[in-house]
Amino acid sequence: MRPLKSLTLEAIIEILTEEFKKVPDKRRAKSVTWEMHAVLMAGFAVMFFQNESLLEFQRRMKKEKRTK
């Protein structure tokens, strides 16, 4: 891991990505659709953007994408 010069969102995402990839995935391989890293990053996004749920987050992102 590189030393931080400042705590930017990009730096946080990089750190979380490195750490989340180390988390063991104990789910049955047949039932896995999303990699554990992606699931954990989605959880971080919900918390970072302070949404009440992942569904609310997805709806907000979809709405913002349409307005651009």
Image: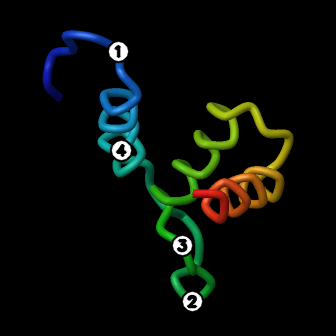
Mark 4 secondary-structure assignment: helix
Residue in view at x 54 percent, y 72 percent:
34
Mark 1 secondary-structure assignment: loop
Counting residues from the start of the chain, the first of labels 1 and 2 encountered is 1
The location of residue 57, given as percent across then percent down, is: 74, 51
Q: Are marks 3 and 4 in contact (CB under 8 Å)?
A: no
Residue in view at x 69 percent, y 42 percent:
46
State the residue position of label 1. Answer: 7
Residue 28 quadrant? bottom right
Instruction: Please tell me whether mark 2 or mark 3 is closer to you in this view.
Output: 3
Label number found at residue 17? 4
Instruction: Please tell me whether mark 1 or mark 2 is closer to you in this view.
Output: 1
Residue farthest along the top direction in this orientation: 5
State the residue position of label 2. Answer: 30
Counting residues from the start of the chain, the first of labels 1 and 4 encountered is 1
The residues bearing labels 3 and 4 have C-alpha atoms spaced at a distance of 15 Å
Q: Are marks 2 and 3 in contact (CB under 8 Å)?
A: no
Determine whether 16 is above or below 25 in the image: above
The location of residue 37, given as percent across then percent down, is: 45, 56
* 12 relative to 18 in the view: left or right: right
Bin the neighbour count of mark 4 within 10 Å (Cα to Cα): few under 14, some 14-19, many 20 and up: some
The location of residue 6, given as percent across then percent down, is: 27, 11
Mark 3 secondary-structure assignment: loop
Counting residues from the start of the chain, the first of labels 4 and 2 encountered is 4
Bin the neighbour count of mark 3 within 10 Å (Cα to Cα): few under 14, some 14-19, many 20 and up: few
Counting residues from the start of the chain, the first of labels 1 and 3 encountered is 1
State the residue position of label 3. Answer: 34
Q: Are marks 1 and 4 in contact (CB under 8 Å)?
A: no
Q: Are marks 4 and 2 in contact (CB under 8 Å)?
A: no
The residues bearing labels 4 and 2 have C-alpha atoms spaced at a distance of 24 Å
Q: Are marks 1 and 3 in contact (CB under 8 Å)?
A: no
* 49 relative to 1 in the view: left or right: right
